[in-house]
Image: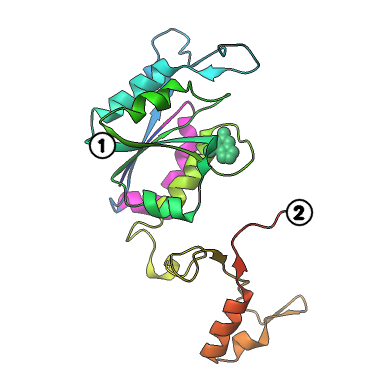
Amino acid sequence: MRIDIISIFPDFFEPLKLSLIGKAQEKNLVEINIHDLRDFTHDKHKTVDDAPYGGGPGMVMSPTPWGDAIDSILNTTEQATLIIPTPSGEAFIQKTANQLTTEEHLIFACGRYEGIDARVAQHYINSEKIKEVKEISLGNYVLNGGEVASIAIIEAVTRLIPGVLGNEESAIDDSFAPGEMEDRTEGPIFTRPPVWRDLEVPEILLSGDHKKIADWRKSQQSSATPKSS
Ligand code: 6GU
C-alpha cells in the first residue's frame, strides 16, 4: 500500500517511523510519503488560509495549494482514494478500516482551522484519478486538525495488511474482527503474578480447562458501543 499525507505539520507524522508501522515500511509492505502543504504555496508568507466567505470566526484553508499538492501526487499514480478527516465526515469504524486496507493508494488531506474549502472535495469527486473521496470523522468531538485522526486511521488500516502484525499480535481474534467479534470488544486480560496488590487473577484462567476458559472469555465480552459517563 502507498500512503501520501499532506499537512502543514509534517513533523506530526514522526511517530509513523516507530514500532509496527515503522517495521512495515522497512519491509516494504507500506510506503508512506509526507508532504508539506506550504511547499505548494506561491507567496512569500506561504499562506494556506483565508477568511470565510459569508463572514464568521476562524479561517478556512485555501483550495489553491490543496489542489496543487494533490495534483502533484496524482501525477505519480494510476488512481488513489482521497481521505479528508473532518468531524462532519462519516464515522470511522472497524468496517471502514477493513475496506481501506484493500486499497492500493491512500491520500490524506489534513485540514486545520475551520477546515478545507469545500470545493476541494467537490473537485476530486469528479477526477478520474480519484477512486473515491472519503470524508471521515473519528467521533463526535472536535480535534485541532486532521493529523491525529489520520494517524489513527493509518494505524487501524495498516495493521490489517498481511505481514504487518506478527503471529503474536495477529488481528483475527481482536475486538471488532469480522465474524464472532464483529460488534464486540474483548474482556479483561491478565498475566503474572497471580496475586498483585491483593488482587487475584480469576481462578478459571489458572484451571487449564480450555473449553471453560473460552466460555468465560466469551461471557466477559461486551457489545461494542463505548460506554460514556
Ligand atoms: Cl477526523 N477531524 C477533526 N478536526 N476533528 C475530529 C475528527 C476529525 N474526528 C473527530 N473530531
Q: Residue at x 62, y 11 (%)?
A: 55
* Image-quadrant location for residue 109: top left
Disc 2, SS:
loop
Give the labeled residue for mark 2: 229
User: Which quadrant of the rendered structure holds the C terminus?
Assistant: bottom right
As drawn, 28 above or below 195: above
Q: Could you say whether the residue bearing mark 1 is in a helix, strand or loop?
A: loop
Counting residues from the N terminus, which is met first, the one under dot 2 or under dot 1?
A: 1
Residue 150, how many percent across, how many down?
A: 48, 40
In reply to whether residue 228 is colored magenta, the answer given is: no
Task: Report the residue marked by disc 1.
Answer: 79
Q: Which mark is residue 225?
A: none
Horizontal relation, residue 105 to residue 186: left or right: left
Residue range corresponding to the magenta coloring = 6-26
User: In the image, is 81 to the left or to the right of 115?
Assistant: left
The quadrant holding residue 179 is bottom left
